[in-house]
Image: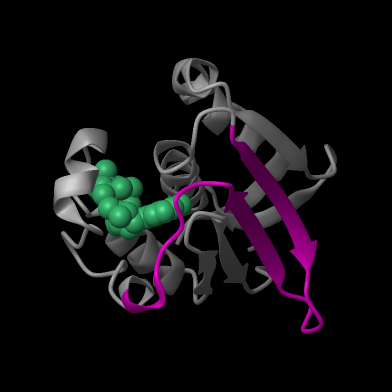
Amino acid sequence: LNIELVNIFKLVKDTLQLFSHEIEKKGLNVRIEIDEELSLYCDKLKLKHIITNLIQNAIRYNLENGEIKIKVQNDKKNEWVFVISDTGIGISDKDKERIFERFYRVDKSHSKTVGGTGLGLAVVKESVDALSGRIKVKSQINKGTTFYVILPRFKAR
Ligand code: ATP
Ligand code: MG
């Protein structure tokens, strides 16, 4: 790991910038609830990779004029919790168990129209593991999906 001080607000802003075209085209409303001053020690590349993939999914599997919310909070154990939620198509309980598998895509015939290889979340899971974190998903069909990435506090080295 390459631990450095990372400004989270800037990291999220820069990531959203990469997708500004898609966000605009779909008319998505993105809300960031992160203190502009929030900086924490982490592996910046790994964190960027995780956030990029989750945001890409939140855009891709959202509906026209949908919403995306991104926030970072502390849990009781003083870990960092990154929360990325969307108002998209949702994921069934049965599929939830499999989305972190390589090449798994929900209803391939349907998702054919929204290209992708099914690798994103598998690699996200690897990055989260490398950071000794956990990833959880809550979702309701046709309501939306929320991903929680829980990371321990790293110290400066
Ligand atoms: P890739 O990320 O490799 O371009 P992908 O998006 O299909 O392709 P994953 O990111 O691994 O692959 O996601 C796996 C599957 O989980 C997706 O194909 C989709 O069916 C489902 N999925 C992932 N994120 C969401 C979400 N936010 N809302 C609804 N379904 C989702
Ligand atoms: Mg993806």
Q: At 38% from the left edge and 59% from the top edge, which residue is drawn?
A: 124
Q: Is residue 77 above or below residue 50?
A: below
Q: At 63% from the left edge and 38% from the top edge, which residue is drawn?
A: 67
- In the rendered image, residue 149 lying in the magenta stretch gets the answer no
x then y, percent, for residue 103: 16, 59
- Quadrant where the C terminus is found in the figure: bottom right
Is 79 positioned to the left or the right of 63 in the image? right
x then y, percent, for residue 35: 85, 43
The image quadrant of residue 82 is: bottom right
Q: At 70% from the left edge and 67% from the top edge, which residue is drawn?
A: 80
Residue in the foreground of this view, choosing between 137 and 8: 137
- Quadrant where the N terminus is found in the figure: bottom left
Region rendered in magenta: 66-94
Q: Is residue 154 visible?
A: yes
Q: Is residue 130 above or below residue 44?
A: below
Q: Is residue 40 above or below residue 93?
A: above
Residue in the foreground of this view, choosing between 107 and 38: 107
